[in-house]
Amino acid sequence: MPADSRSPEMSVSDLILYISCPRRVYFTSRGFELIAEMNASRLERMLLKELALTYPEILNKCSLNADSLYHELDAALDRAQKDLPLLFPGELKETGQEMLEEAAAAARARLQEITSNLLLALEEYGREPLLAAVTPVKTESLLSSARLNLKGVPSKLVCFEGTLVPSIIRPGNCPTQGVWASDRLRAAAFTLLLENESGKEVPFAFVEYAAFGLLRRVTVRSADRREVLKISRRVEKIKAGFMPEKKEGKLCSHCSFAEHCSSGSSLMSKFF
Ligand code: SF4
């Protein structure tokens, strides 16, 4: 089959899974489910991501002093708490109200820092550029490339300085400077996918660290593109049946594949 007529087999999340552990790609590609435990900390991250999606509306309407910004964020967090079970009915079906309240309290404890950082960004970049950087032209739209055999859904596409660029909302920790290596890989992968769809060069992407109200611009270099292509080829090989070596690490202790993984490759080959 010619390469361009394939529908993509790999997703950007496969590439991210590969850098956490190549064997996880092997198991998920064979129908095993990577079970992410639902707990207050995961719910908190989900709430903070929903909150980040409201920044454009908030920055547009309020008078942008610390009090009004905090008040608007607080109200938006209340709405996110109410909406979350409607937005993710599958993930939250076993989740009690108590856990959701614990998560909302933890998210609310972050609001002061988010408010300060958004105000600093307004001061540093100006209202219009900041609004352009956070306002979606499209939200969670599928990007796909038969040529790369890759697909993925960035949090947003935003139009900044006349260029359509991907923006990724990350609800976890934030590095002191720049972005985490996994976020750089995401940014580069979405950039390649967007270039494939638009036919135009996409020189950078944004990463929003939602728990901090920080926006980081990532210049996508050739080395980042090379990394996406290199990992894509490795993931392709795994999906075709190659089982990578076990990479013993701290993830193993709470990995849902641990039992299968420790069975060893000879036993695994009996199953697959
Ligand atoms: S148990 Fe460890 S090596 Fe095996 S899949 Fe999980 S994280 Fe990877």
Image (cartoon, helix red, strand yellow):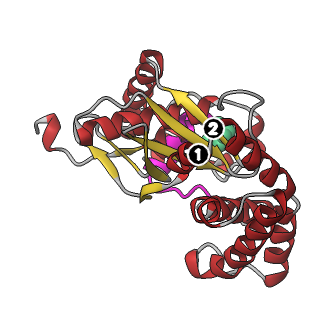
**Is residue 28 within the magenta segment?**
yes
Mark linked to residue 168: none
- Is residue 68 depicted above or below 202 in this figure? below
Q: Is mark 2 within 8 Å of ligand 1?
A: no
Q: Is mark 1 within 8 Å of ligand 1?
A: no
Instruction: Write the start and end of the magenta stretch as one range.
Output: 17-35
- Is residue 144 depicted above or below 223 in this figure? below
Q: Residue at x 64, y 64 (%)?
A: 58
**Residue 18 rendering spot, x and y as whole percentages:** 53, 35
**SS for tag 2?**
helix
The part of the image, by quadrant, that contains residue 59 is bottom right
- Ligand 1 position by quadrant: top right
The residue pinned by badge 1 equals 130
Q: Residue furthest front?
A: 63
Q: Is residue 21 visible from the viewing direction of this image?
A: no
Mark linked to residue 125: 2
Structural crowding at the residue carrying mark 2, measured as other residues with C-alpha within 10 Å and reported as few (<14), some (14–19) or many (≥20): few
Q: Main secondary structure of the magenta part?
A: helix
Q: Does the residue at mark 2 contact the one at mark 1 (Cβ under 8 Å)?
A: yes
**Residue 265 rendering spot, x and y as whole percentages:** 54, 35
Lower position in the chain sequence, tag 2 or tag 1? 2
